[in-house]
Structure formats: structure tokens, C-alpha cells
Image (cartoon, rainbow, N blue to C red):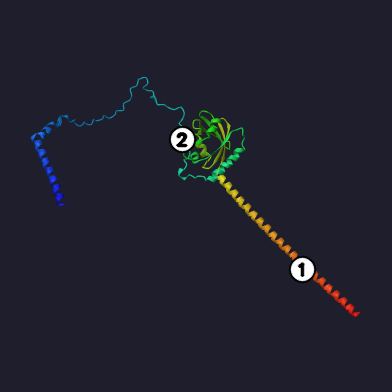
Amino acid sequence: MVGAKKKVMSYEEVRRQRVEENKKRMEDLNLLKLAKHLRPQPNPSSNPSPAKPRARRPAVLAPARRSSRIADQPSVSYREVSATPPLSLSTFSYQRRDLLNRVYASSEVRQYAIHRAEELQSTLDPEHPSFVKPMLQSHVTGGFWLGLPSLFCKTYLPKEDEMMTLIDEGEEPSQTKYLAGKTGLSGGWRGFAIDHELVDGDALVFQLVSPTEFKVHIIRANEVGGDSEKENQDEEEEEEDEALEKGKRAKAKAAEKENKNEEDDDLDSTRRRSKRIRTGKNCISGFLITLQEACL
């Protein structure tokens, strides 16, 4: 440790001596003075004086210069005025749905709704093409964009953007914007979905009754759930009825078997009694014969 300290001290001492020698050389060569002279000196006259704030004159509202011929006439306004009154936003506004409390349909309910929709589609007129469209959250909440089957659109729908009419089961029409490039319904579909209270899991059958008109049949998921519950209840009731019928048949068989056993017992007892009577008659007849022989 002492040797290391001596080495450190000697290094520091050598370094300090070298610094002093360099300073001495710089003083001998007048380098410090030359550097000071070469450094640019600040010019006090070149500093700009701070700008004085200008006092603003108060605005004088003087009448505009006008000709004496029209001085007595009212002033003309050149502001653009729309010929039609502005559309009220409340007319086209719908209540925003709560996206945080979305209700998602189960896979069983969704599949059953699709099955019901396909059954309904099979009963429609085949001359008018149709397709089944299950509803998702993006169709009925949030984005409100309804994509249609691309093959159906390319085969039957217009090749350019067109206004389509959706007619519900109550014959109420609704206008929607069909985008041919995206093969889907955009403007107006949101109002249709909200007005008809469509939810996730519903299944819709679209029937093209004219080039720009759809007949829409709605299969609701909540009704499907009610039907399935009712069918389950009916099945349970049928099972209970079958169990009762089986119980009744079992009771009837048991009673029939018991009656048969009783009849067999009665028959056996009758046979035994008749056998005993025959035996008694035989004994009496033998006794009488023996008695007659003894008398003779």
C-alpha cells in the first residue's frame, strides 16, 4: 500500500511539474497575450436597443363612404345565404349504443338461428335469389358495416354504387348505400339495424325482389333461445309422460300377474278340493261295499 501511494504521488507530482513547465513556456512565447488580442471584443454600439412598444390608436367606427343617392337606403349584405334550410342533426341522429356492455350470442344460439334462417330460405320463391347473413357485433354495433357475399354481389347486384331499398317484414322501406367496390352496405344500414333492434346472433335472410330492392326476413336470437327452451320443456314433459305411461304399464302387468297367480291358486285349491271329494267318495263307496258283503 505504501509503495502504491508513493507511485501515485510521484505521478501527480510529475504531472503538476509538466503543467507548470507548459505554462512557463506559453508565457515566454506570449501566447496568452496573443490569444487575448485575437479574441473578438464586444462592440457596445452594435447592441440593438430594445424596441419601444407602439401605442395603438383606438379604432374609430366611422360610417362607410356611400353615394348620396343611396345614403337613405338600407345597406346591402353580400353574405351567402343557403336556399334550403340546414338539416337538423337530430333528424338523423340515433342513440349511441353502449359498446362496453355488449352481449355476445353463444355458438349454440347462433347455429340454431342460422338453421332456422336456412329453413325459411328454403320456403322462399327460387326465382328471386336470396342468401343468409348472420349478424356479428361489427354489423349491429360500432362500425355498422355489412359485408355481403361477393359472389352474390357480382352475379346479381349493380356494378356501380347504388341506393338499395330494404323492406322489412312489416313492408317498411329503408334506404341504404350499396358500395359495389367493397360489396357491402354502408350509409343507412346503421339506421336499419338500430330501428329493428338487431343484436349479435340474429340471422337475416336477404331476398332480392328487384335489382335494387331486398326483402329482409329477421330470425332473432332471443326468440330462438325461447323456442329452444320451449322445445326442451316440451321434451321434458314428453319424457315425464312416457315415464308415467311406463309406470302405468308396469303396474298393470304386475296386477295382471297377481290376478293370474290368484286364479292359479283358486284353480289349484278347487282341484285339490275336488280330489279330496273324489277320494272321500271312493272311501265311502268302499266302506259300503265292505259292509254289504259282511251282512250277506
Label 1 vs 2, first from the N-terminus: 2
Q: Residue furthest bottom?
A: 295
Residue that badge 1 annotates: 269
Q: Residue drawn 63% across and 52% down?
A: 238
In this rendering, the label closer to the viewer, 1 or 2: 1
* Labelled disc at residue 89: 2
Q: Quadrant of residue 205?
A: top right
249 vs 290: above or below: above
- Bin the neighbour count of mark 2 within 10 Å (Cα to Cα): few under 14, some 14-19, many 20 and up: few
Q: Residue drawn 56% across and 40% down?
A: 218
Measuring from the top left, give residue 123's x and y in whole percent: 62, 38
* Label 2 secondary element: helix
Measuring from the top left, give residue 53's x and y in whole percent: 23, 31
Measuring from the top left, give residue 88's x and y in whole percent: 46, 34
Q: Residue furthest left?
A: 28
Measuring from the top left, give residue 100's x and y in whole percent: 45, 44
Describe residue 22's horizontal placement relative to residue 108 as left or right: left
94 and 264: which one is in front? 264
286 and 138: which one is in front? 286
* Label 1 secondary element: helix
